[in-house]
Structures are given as C-alpha cells and as structure tokens.
Image (cartoon, grey):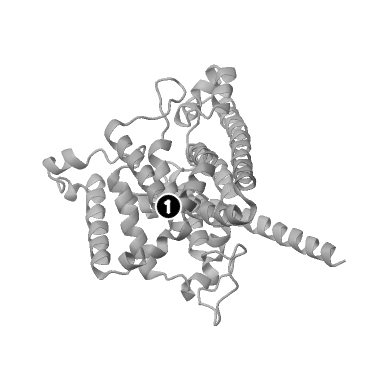
Amino acid sequence: MAATGAATADSSAEPVERPAPPAPSGRDLRLDLFRGLALWFIFLNHVPNNVANWITNRNFGFSDATEIFVFISGYTAAMVYGRQLDSSGVMVTSARILRRAWQLYVAFIFLFVIYLAEISYVVGSFENPLYAEEMGALQFLAEPDVALVQALLLKFRPANMDVLPLYIVLLATFPPILWALKRWADATLAASFLLWLAVQVWGFNLTGYPDDRTWFFNPFGWQFMFVFGGWCGLGGSDRLAGLVHSRIILALSVLYLVLSLAVVTSWYWPPMEGFVPEAIGNIIYPISKTDLSVLRFAHFLALAVVVVRLIPVHSPFLYWRLLKPMIICGQHSLEVFCFGVFLSFAAHFVLNEVSGTVFMQLTLSVAGIAFMVGLSALLSWYARAERDRAARKRAG
C-alpha cells in the first residue's frame, strides 16, 4: 500500500540487469515513487485550464493525489520515528518529530510570504484583481496585517497551500499517537477510525479565515489516513498481506475502481449522464474531499490493493532509469511541493497573459515537472556531497 506525508534522470526505459542499490533511507522504493508521482499530479492539478491534468488520478476515481501523499507521509513517519523511539526513547523522538513539524511550519510561512508577493506583484503590474480572487489572496490585499497573523495561526491559506498546514498539524500531534501505535496499534487505529466516522456524521472542523470558512482538509477526518499509514508502517501492512493477496479482494477492488470510474465519467461526459440513479446519488453525494469521505477512502484502498499486486516490493520495474526522476522527487517532497506551488501560479499566469493553447499547456506542464526534477537532483547531489565530506572528515 502506498499516500498521506511527503520524494536522476536517464532516457532509458529498460530495467537494469541487477537491482540498483536501495533508496538512501533503505525503505521501500514504492513509497518514494508514488509520493513523487503524487507531487507531479498535485502540480498539474494546481494549474487551471490545463489539459495535462486530465491524466491525473482525480479524473479516474473518487480519490486523488492527496490520499497518496498523506498515507505515505504517515507510513514513513511511523517507520522512521518508530525506530528512533526504540533506540532514543520517547522524549528525544518526540523532540525530533516536533522539530520536523517546526521546519514544516517555517517552510509554510516562507512559502506564504513569497507566494503572496508573487501574486501581489502580478495583480499590481497587470492591473488584474481576478488573480487575487482566484488564488484566495483578496483578504491579504485588503488587510495584510490581519491576514498575516491568521496565516501564522494556519487559519489563512491561499489557494494551493492547504496540504502543508494539514501535514503540520498531523505531524505536530503525532508523538503521542506514535507512542500509542507502538504499544496498542489496533486500539489506536480503532480510536482514529471512530473519530473519522464522527466527522462523517457531524462534520465538525477547524475554523479558518475569514471566519465563515473552515479548513479545506479537515484534520479530524484526514488524521485517519495518516494514522492508517502509520499503522501500516509499523507492521500493519504485513498483517494485511493475506487480504491484499486474496483473489476475492482483488476482484472486488477492480470492480470498485471500474464503478468509480464510471461514476466520475458521468460527471463530465454527456452520454454517461444519468448513470447514477437519483436514489443512489442521494446516498453517495457529496463525496467530500474536505472530510475524507468513506467512498474516497475505499477508493484509495482499492487502488492500493491493485498497485501492490502489480508492483511487488522487489519488482524490477522500480529500478527502471526512466522512473528515477519521480523517485528523487519523492525523496525531497517538502522542497518539491513548495517549488510546485510557485511553478503552478507562474504557469497559470503564462496561460492567461501569453498563450492558452494546448501546446503551451503541455509545454508548461512538462517544463514545470522538469524544474521539479532539476531541484530534486540538485538537492540529492548536495546531500551526497555532504555525506562524502563527513565521511572524509571522520576518516581523516
């Protein structure tokens, strides 16, 4: 299984003769691969009126890249910090988790300031206030002092920045959850599940800014995806192996994916209009992304079952050189996500002010992903250089 929290290039698509060395962390390469893919999809989806975002998974079922990102973030957090909990104890590990949450918070504030400066410059230079409205920046332009304070409280989030505050809250509250997962894994998952179910029934959420808004990604709902990822990362996925490899579960998963594809297609393709009977529609709609609805979570599970069956952990497919750019993006997920937010607005600006042709849409999509890969390659090179320097210093 692979989602929710956070990744050089070679033109050859042939698998190598022998497996390549594992990822630097020694973890399942599928985690980096699909987190990198999720980051690419998030970038494409953040560019409005972009034909390239039709290839993303949100157009083929109920779930999208966010579920993948949050699940994988929970999985890797539990795997990494779970080992540290065993070796360093609760206090030290909790401090490390909170330090990482603080780093994410600083990244969010930095991203907020630069992103709003980018939007404000475009609005002022081209005298087009629609950019501020589209990107959710009107409050900042109207009362920047209040908006900045609300941003510091994670309550004000311009368009395309909702995932990072969610991840900050999930990670900041993770120390006691990790401790509980290590001792009472099933009970902790059950408590998380009950909280998620309560959200589906009562819909409570955190307030945002302005006051009539709530969080787009409800932390009380999305915590279940993160905790489920953590539960899997601490051994739960091994316990699910029997179900995942069951032919009946596989058949049900494929059937659910096909039905969800048909339902989503009926939203966009006139010949499929009316595919969902009104009585069924009254039951399944709305399929809430904000609260992580049951149908979205079930779609993610079905997709995960199929992916795990198609791509085993030691599949030669994972070592194709063509996939290496996606993997390194997954290994630098925070930096790539922040960079993708800048790139998506820049692409949106070019499509509005320069040219909105299909050729330009595809060009900007490919260029944006190339820039993200380039940043990841640079960060990987720097990390290797630092490790080599440290090794030479120890040896000397």
Q: Is residue 164 above or below residue 210?
A: below
Q: Nearer the viewer, residue 165 or 57?
A: 165
Is residue 370 something that shows in the picture?
no
Q: Nearer the viewer, residue 93 or 98?
A: 93
- Location of the C terminus by quadrant is bottom right
Q: Is residue 389 above or below residue 163?
A: below
Find residue 126 and report its image quarter. Answer: top right
Identify the amino acid type marked 1. Answer: Ala
Say which residue appears at 30% left-offset and 52% top-offset: 298
Say which residue appears at 53% left-offset and 17% top-offset: 142
Left or right: 329 in relation to 260: right
- Location of the N terminus by quadrant is bottom left
Q: Is residue 265 above or below residue 29?
A: above
Residue 68 image offset from top left, x and y in percent: 43, 52
For label 1, the residue is 185
Left or right: 91 in relation to 295: right
